[in-house]
Amino acid sequence: MQAAVDLARQQGVRLTPVRLRTLEILLETHQAMGAYEVLERLAAEGFGSQPPVAYRALDFLVQHGLAHRVQRLNAFAACLTPGHDHAPAFLICRSCNKVAEADVPAIRDAVGQAAGDSGFSVERMTVEVLGLCDRCAAGAEVRP
């Protein structure tokens, strides 16, 4: 959390109470969360129950590098390395939807090289990898 507060201060932006609590909610789980899941938690804590409350906070967090949008799940996950220039690869379990963030410089470099060779400038890149986490893979092996 301190890294997020420091990054916001460096960027000259304000982490309002709802933005801060939204980030805390995302950090509390290893699964990406949908906006309505976040909204339910915010509403239960008195932050408001209208969808824009969650969407505005989540969009802010993504815009400022404090969270990522996981397209496959239409969900959001807290950035584990805020303030660091990286191109995350999300390892998504197709069984339980657990999400792990991995920084894979080799992928970033390869895409950057290919883009440069084509005269394209990469501004943002997210890689989503679908598979099974250790726990679900172990369970799949014992099933007939």
Image (cartoon, rainbow, N blue to C red):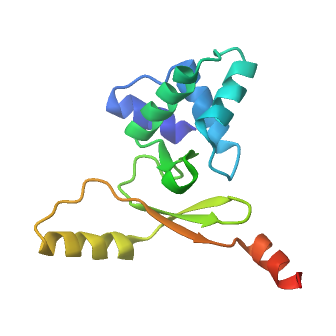
Examine the rendered structure and indicate whether residue 49 appears above or below residue 64.
above
Q: Measuring 49% from the left and 32% from the top, which residue is drawn there?
A: 5
Residue 18 position, x and y percent, is 57, 21
The residue lying furthest to the left in this view is 119
Residue 139 position, x and y percent, is 84, 76
Q: Quadrant of residue 100?
A: bottom right
Examine the rendered structure and indicate whether residue 101 appears above or below residue 22.
below
Q: Is residue 110 rendered to the left or right of residue 98?
A: left
The residue lying furthest to the front in this view is 144
Q: Measuring 15% from the left and 63% from the top, which residue is drawn there?
A: 120
Examine the rendered structure and indicate whether residue 53 appears above or below residue 9.
above
Residue 112 position, x and y percent, is 24, 69
Q: Is residue 55 rendered to the left or right of residue 107?
A: right
Q: Nearer the viewer, residue 91 or 85?
A: 91
Q: Quadrant of residue 118?
A: bottom left
Residue 60 position, x and y percent, is 43, 31
Q: Measuring 49% from the left and 38% from the top, which residue is drawn there?
A: 4
**Count of marks overlaid on the render:** 0
Q: Quadrant of residue 47?
A: top right
Q: Measuring 23% from the left and 59% from the top, which residue is drawn there?
A: 122
In the picture, which quadrant includes the C terminus? bottom right
In the picture, which quadrant includes the N terminus? top right
Q: Nearer the viewer, residue 30 or 56?
A: 56
